[in-house]
Every structure is written in structure tokens, then in C-alpha cells.
Amino acid sequence: MSAPIKGTATSANPTPGSNFKSQNHNQNTGSDGFIIAMFTMSNARSYTGCTYGGVSMTQLYQINRGGLSQRMVFYYLANPPTGTNALRVNFNGSVWNPISMHIRSFTNCEGIGSNANTGGTATPNTQNLTVSQDDSLVMMSSCSVNQVLTQQIPTGSNKTFTTHNTNRQVATGAISANAGESAGVISLRSTCTFGNLTLDRIEIKGIGSSVDTSGGDFFMLM
């Protein structure tokens, strides 16, 4: 069994001013390619689809964080075209507020495993994720009115992340260390200066792992 290999990451914090936004991203060459995209924006609009290199991506979840007036979404695509291509996300109307975009490539990746989404909870927001197989990577994102200070995978192990301003504070792109996590329950923590923040977490599976306790490839807690 082996962990996914992290590839190129692209983060941007644009104001689209249109009913779509296109962002170039380089997908690494290698077997079992995989690409994910995470977005956060005002909930005045919704996401209507996402493509990479003209190929439709699959939506894992789209959540209206009503207490923060934000909408968060996660898309993925297996075996995407390699090289530099445009990733385009579409909206149901023109978006005039800033959005948070985080795109990351992988190789040696089997796809999405367990995932869970927790709404606004007082800092520190500590949640569990049941990792379905050995050597998986875990990604997390958070949103708050206030500055996000840490993203911990697992709890106590701070990971680097990108901060974006969407008229709220977004922490995006935090990911496990290269060796990945062991199958079973892990604790994750997000902190901000004060107040509430969300905590979304997603398992990215490697190739050839022998342990699978999820009961299927896709498992989501809302």
C-alpha cells in the first residue's frame, strides 16, 4: 500500500465579476491521476458545475453556511488531462464578491474516501474522521468571521494552509504529511482568534491499500 503523491497546488482569491471563473492549473504526469477543487463564496449565488480541461468534474458536496452567509463546495476528477489546463467553475449568476479557490493535483490516487462537514462551532473546533484505509491523506478547510489560526491534522500537528478573504476568513489547502494517516478514527482541530468556525475534512485514498472500513468509496456525514 502507498500514499497518494502530492502534486501541484494552485490557490487564488479573485473577484469573478461574471457567472464563471477560469483558473489555469498544471496537472502532474503519472499513473492514477486525481484533481480536487475547493471553493468558498457568498451564498448569494450557487455553483452550477466545474470542469478541468473541458472535462466535467464530480461534485462531492455543496453546503450553504447560512450563519456565515457563505457557500462551500468540493469537486473532484479522476484521470484528468495532464499539463496546464483551465479549471472553470460556473455560478447561477454573476459573482461580485471575492471567492476562495484551492486546486490540488495527485498521482497514485484511488479517489475520495470518508468525509464529513461540521458547521460553525466555538473555537477550538475539534472533530473526528474515520479514515477508511492506511496511508490516506486528509484535507481540511474552515471558514469564520474571524482570523483562522491553525489547521491541525491530526490534533496537535499544525499544517500549512492558505488564507483567503471572501468577506469572511477562509483557511484552505491544509493536508496531511506525505506518509498519510493510518486507518481508523483521527482527531482534527481548527482554531480562530475567537468565535465560531466550520471544519470540513476529506480523505484522499492511495493505491493498493488493504484496509477499507468505510463500506464503500463514498461516505459522507452532514
Image (spheres, rainbow, N blue to C red):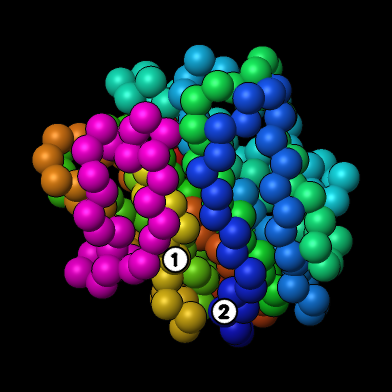
Quarter of the N terminus within the rendering = bottom right
Callout 1: 10 Å neighbours few (<14), some, many (20+)?
Answer: many
Whether residue 202 can be seen here: yes
Residue linked to disc 1: 175
Residue linked to disc 2: 3
Q: Nearer the viewer, residue 89 or 129?
A: 89
Left or right of 49? Residue 183 is: left
Is residue 159 shown in magenta?
Answer: yes
Give the farthest residue toward the left. 194
- Residue type at the position of mark 2: Ala
Is residue 15 shown in magenta?
Answer: no
Residue at position x 39%, y 61% in the image: 161
Residue at position x 61%, y 55% in the image: 103
Up-down relation of residue 210 to residue 113 (above or below): below
Whether residue 219 can be seen here: no
Residue 23, position as x, y percentages in the image: 70, 48
Range of residues picked out in magenta:
144-169
Name the quadrant containing residue 157: bottom left
